[in-house]
Image (cartoon, rainbow, N blue to C red):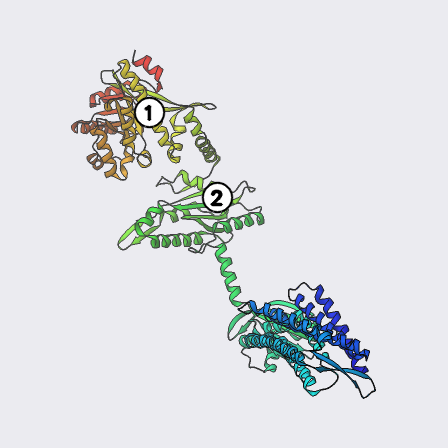
Amino acid sequence: MKNFMIVLSVFAVFVFYCMIRALMNKKPISRHITWLLFYDLVSIIGNIIIIFSGQYKPSFIGYLMYLGGTDWLFYFLVKFSMAFCDYQFEKKWWQWVLLLLTIFDTTSVLLNPLFHHVFTLEAVVLEGGEIYYKLVSHAFHYVHLAFSYAVVAVSLGIFIHKMIHVSRLYLEKYLTIFVTFCIVIVWESWYVFSKEPVDHSMLGYSLCGVLMYYFALRYLPFFLTEKMLSAIVSNMSDAILFLDNKGDCVYFNDGAKKLFNLQAGDYSAAKKTVCAIISDSDMDDCESLQVIRTLSVDNAERIYEIEYQKLNDVRNVYAGAFVSIKDRTEEEAEKRREQYLATHDSLTGLYNKEYLLHKMELLLRDNPETEYLILCSDIKEFKLVNDIFGRQAGDSILANVARVVKSYASDNSVYGRIGGDMFALMMRKKDFSQELFERGSAGFVHKEGNEVYPITMHIGIYEVKERDLAPSIMIDRAFLAMEEIKDNVQQRVAWYDDTMRQSLLWAQQVTASFESALKSMQFIPYLQAQVNADGKTEGAEVLSRWLHPEHGLMGPSRFIPILEKSGDIVRLDRYMWEAACGILARWKREGKNLYLSVNISPKDFYYIDVYAEISSLVKRYGLDPAMLRLEITESVMMNDLDRKMQIINSFRQDGFIVEIDDFGSGYSSLNLLKNIQVDSIKLDMMFLRQSTDSLRTRTILQHIISMAQSLEMPVITEGVETQDQVDFLKVAGCNLFQGYFFSKPITLESFEQKFCS
């Protein structure tokens, strides 16, 4: 009996310790564990009092503590079981029923001193001579037992439900508590029905409480982690092998079986595999090893990432090693593919722009004494090629160009496709042959069935002199040189010089300042008189001049081509049209019967509704359409002829006079003259001045004028500078003259003073 009390006291200390630890724990379930252990401790203390006292009253109090404590022990056992097993009853009211029944049974036990309806005590003498008061059950003690067994059955049912549905990985912790509790119940039942005087089952309750604390709050961080790690290692796709301290393989996972075609339990084959990958010297000399190696497997190259790690025990004595082997073949292949795509153009296989710039920078840095050239090219009207022949044909042309670029490149050069149809090449100056590149750029054709389409390429060249410039700027300069000859079908190669850079800077300045110049009316209409054969001024052509605040008065050659390229010419033309209408409106009020001619740029036909714009201006200013003559160049009619002829016909039907400007200087042909219905043509005497055969040129001019007269199309000749030219043109039948012989372009005020007074 004394030994039992000592053991029970030790268990009481354990239960108290676990209760304090649970109280300090932050997990939600720790609250239920704390209360469960508290009432377990109350029951244990009651038993200790019963055993230790040997007197009636203390023993009576001990039994009250024991029976009342077990009531709440079982109540919190249900609460713990629900929390531990993640179980919830569908009906919430049962918890209130359980609480009320627990209170009722505890109250019944506490009222026993008054009614003795639960138990009485009977003194017995044990074998050692100790007096012990055993419990004599009455009716309500059996009610207490029935309630206790029912509550315990609920808890066991919750555990059974959880064990049926839980993963086998977690089964152990539930099964251990379940089995222990079943043993305690059997132990308790044996005490009740065997009439033994001393209840030893309290040891089982104590053990159960400690196990619940352990599995709820301590088990997860250790054993569960070990099991999960074991499951993870077993199911990893990487090959994992363990070697003992003798170097023999004692474990390999499914990943190793699959990777090396190992049979289950064939540890000798596994060891041979490890030795084939990691040499004996590596295993002997290295504490750890992490390498990537390429091995031949089944006549194919495979890439493996290998990790080898020696393991020591707590005494730092060598215990074995583990080997991790990962097949990186596909990953490395994908990595190389991604690296290739990141640095190369997918269509041509050449370097892409970003990587080409990087390679250029490296080449210049590593060869500071070598002279280099940067060559850039594109395909003239490549979009048109794509539209006509399709994307597939366009891709084929680009691939062919790439092959030619590659074939022309020397060993110490870099090249690539930098976007669209644009290619760039940096090569040593001494390896460059302009003749070779001119011949190569002229030899491209595309065959589509029986049709052969010539591919025009231009090449811009920048000689690397300023080596501190970024390669992207060098490429821009090469393209700038190429732009200079883009419309020249005869010249295929152009070299960059500083004049081009100055032109580019000037173009940027013009474009940047155009908006403010337009708003501040820096553009001024200048008039150049048009005189008939009798010397009478009939009208004038409106020409734009820019009165720049820094550069002074600028002629059209300094800004018109730039505005044509940027598209801003459309806004300037509208500005000049309205200025002309304003002048004509004032002349009309003053009785001056003179017309004005204005120019319509080819860009105007694409960006605005020319007919609507000019018609609305004439109506707004109340003008006779015939007083505002419209000049269009031959180049306007080279594309979309039908639509533009409709616009011209609309103008003519409204009474406007439409003239072809610079006839004979560009694309004119008899076929074009046949299709275009206009009111007059305008010849440029530059045609005569540029010819070395004056007689031949005069004959051509005379026949053009004669043909125009036959078509009832008056002829205006501009660029007239001498009396000899005037005399010739009069004899030839020219109607109107314009040029410096009569007047250079002058301001409106000067024009009115000279020709309107």
Which mark is drawn over residue 475? 2
Which amino acid, by three-letter code, is at mark 1?
A: Glu
| Frontmost residue, 429 versus 739 | 739
Q: Is residue 84 left or right of residue 745?
A: right
Q: Nearer the viewer, residue 148 or 663?
A: 148
Tell me which residue sits at (52%, 42%) in the image. Answer: 464
The percent position of residue 533, horizontal first and vertical second, equals 22, 18
Which quadrant is the C terminus positioned in?
Answer: top left
Q: Residues within 10 Å of mark 2 (few under 14, many from 20)?
A: many
Q: Is residue 536 above or below residue 42?
A: above
Taking depth in this image into account, of 384 and 370 the one nearest to the observer is: 384
Please name the residue that numbered disc 1 is placed on: 578
Left or right, residue 405 beside residue 37 = left
Q: Quadrant of residue 751?
A: top left
Q: Give, as a three-letter code, the residue at label 2.
A: Ile
Image quadrant of residue 649?
top left
* Image location of residue 210, percent across then percent down: 70, 74
Outermost residue, front side: 115
Position of 389 relative to 290 (above/below): above
- The residue most toward the top is 757
Query: Callout 2: helix, strand or loop?
Result: helix
